[in-house]
């Protein structure tokens, strides 16, 4: 059974999550929100904050469930159903709590929360935690850094798209433009960080 | 006759007018992640088809029993069951494909297309039209996956291998090679890497938007 304390290089996990294996550009996870919410910077920041928080909490919750409940009883095949239900309930719970206690935060973040349940990046991060046999600390760090990597690319892309739109550059309308921006960013990430070893 | 025509129109609608990737812009993640070759694209498409058919069939059968307030969790459990089945089948019978698809088989559970069809179609329509709808959407999705996979394989490796899922001679399920096509160009490895996926789908989407606009203009002038 993987241990609670970190057994792997945490710096490596952080750099992998943010750059080398960036969730949006290398793993292609969470692209629906990437296409839908990168038209303006404010919504992309709101979504990134919400996703990072949910990724961290999902990693914290699902690791004990897998290693203390599913694995000892040989129920690993239930991981998909189990994880998606945990994430959906957790998102719902967070929405209730924020609405009750932090109405201002709810107004700015509220609309993004239900979207997160079907964001494949969140389910992706908990499945990758399990498949890579991370320790408890390692999986939490991976959850946070995956969220930060997601946020970084969301922010950069929305900045580029906003500027292009303000300058009246309407070369490729709609999603086509977002895909070409993503292609160039992905080229940078793959070529630059693909060769660095930590 | 009336019913058959409507069933076939459901089928065609899923392939062209409601094409999941290019028209509805749903399910982009697997479309880009697993399409490094024709074979992987086809494998993902078939896994998706199984889940889509199963979920549309069951949700359509249960549509009168499902209370609308908890329908989304019920959809997710139904879809999750089929995803688990297909994940285990691929792991057992097609280990190379299982390696290639990785976490994208379990991730079918959060694929917007499947939940979207359950919510928008299967929950409101009888069984036969729901199956036709699932088949149409799946065929549309397989066409897109194999098209993108084929383009990336052809430009990235200089050759393309057409395969088909079939029972092999040893009685095992596997991919049967139909034909291999070589083109005399320098392979561009970047097409196999992530940037190639974004370039390919961006270019294809630009092309289909352009063609769609031209067709609409023509129709508008004809009226």
Image: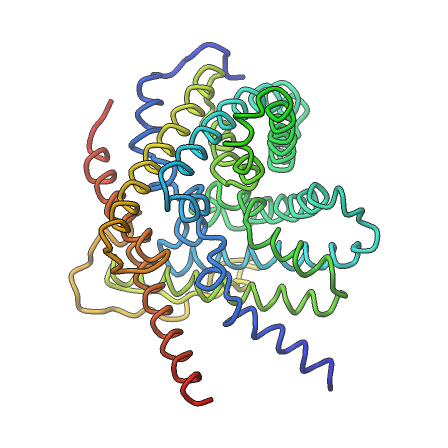
What is the quadrant of the C terminus of chain A in the image? top left
On screen, residue B114 versus residue A196, left or right, reads right
Residue B195 visible somewhere in the drawing: no
* Visual colour scheme: rainbow
* Image coordinates for residue B171, horizontal then vertical, percent: 57, 59
> Which residue corresponds to the image point at 57% horizontal and 72% vertical from the top-left?
B13
Q: Nearer the viewer, residue A170 or B110?
A: A170
What is the quadrant of the N terminus of chain A in the image? top right
Question: From what the image shows, is residue B112 above or below residue A64?
Answer: below
> Which residue corresponds to the image point at 58% horizontal and 59% vertical from the top-left?
B49
Q: Can you tell which quarter of the image residue A21 is in?
A: top left
Question: From what the image shows, is residue B48 above or below residue A7?
Answer: below
Question: From what the image shows, is residue B75 above or below residue B145?
Answer: above
Q: How many marks?
A: 0
Given the current orientation, which residue lies at the most extreme bottom position?
B222
> Which residue corresponds to the image point at 21% horizontal and 40% vertical from the top-left?
A188
* Image coordinates for residue A11, horizontal then vertical, percent: 31, 18
Q: Nearer the viewer, residue A77 or B61?
A: B61
Q: Can you tell which quarter of the image residue B41 is in?
A: bottom left
* Image coordinates for residue A140, horizontal then vertical, percent: 46, 19
């Amino acid at each position: 059974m993987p241990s609670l304390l970190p057994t792997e290089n945490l710096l490596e996990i952080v750099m992998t999550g943010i750059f080398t294996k960036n969730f949006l550009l290398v793993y292609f996870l969470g692209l629906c929100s990437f296409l839908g919410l990168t038209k303006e910077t404010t919504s992309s920041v709101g979504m990134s904050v919400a996703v990072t928080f949910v990724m961290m909490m999902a990693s914290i919750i699902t690791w004990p469930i897998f290693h203390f409940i599913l694995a000892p009883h040989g129920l690993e095949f239930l991981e998909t159903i189990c994880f998606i239900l945990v994430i959906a309930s957790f998102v719902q719970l967070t929405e209730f709590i924020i609405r009750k206690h932090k109405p201002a935060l709810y107004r700015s973040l509220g609309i993004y929360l239900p979207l997160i349940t079907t964001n494949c990046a969140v389910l992706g991060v908990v499945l990758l935690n399990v498949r890579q046999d991370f320790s408890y600390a390692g999986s939490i760090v991976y959850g946070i850094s995956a969220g930060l990597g997601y946020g970084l690319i969301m922010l950069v892309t929305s900045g580029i798209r906003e500027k292009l739109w303000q300058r009246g550059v309407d070369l490729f309308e709609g999603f086509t433009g977002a895909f070409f921006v993503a292609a160039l960013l992905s080229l940078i990430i793959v070529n630059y960080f693909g060769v660095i070893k930590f | 006759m009336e019913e058959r025509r409507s069933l076939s129109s459901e089928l065609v609608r899923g392939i062209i007018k409601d094409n999941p990737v290019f028209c509805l812009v749903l399910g982009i993640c697997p479309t880009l992640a697993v399409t490094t070759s024709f074979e992987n694209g086809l494998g993902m498409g078939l896994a998706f088809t199984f889940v889509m058919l199963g979920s549309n069939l069951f949700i359509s059968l249960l549509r009168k029993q499902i209370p609308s307030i908890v329908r989304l969790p019920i959809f997710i459990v139904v879809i999750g069951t089929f995803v688990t089945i297909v994940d285990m089948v691929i792991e057992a019978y097609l280990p190379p494909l299982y390696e290639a698809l990785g976490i994208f088989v379990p991730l079918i559970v959060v694929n917007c297309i499947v939940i979207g069809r359950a919510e928008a179609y299967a929950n409101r329509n009888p069984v036969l039209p729901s199956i036709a709808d699932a088949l149409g959407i799946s065929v549309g999705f397989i066409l897109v996956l194999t098209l993108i996979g084929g383009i990336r394989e052809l430009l990235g490796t200089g050759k393309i291998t057409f395969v088909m899922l079939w029972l092999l001679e040893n009685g095992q399920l596997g991919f049967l090679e139909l034909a291999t096509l070589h083109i005399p160009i320098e392979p561009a490895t970047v097409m196999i890497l992530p940037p190639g996926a974004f370039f390919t789908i961006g270019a294809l989407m630009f092309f289909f938007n352009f063609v769609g606009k031209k067709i609409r203009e023509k129709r508008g002038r004809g009226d």
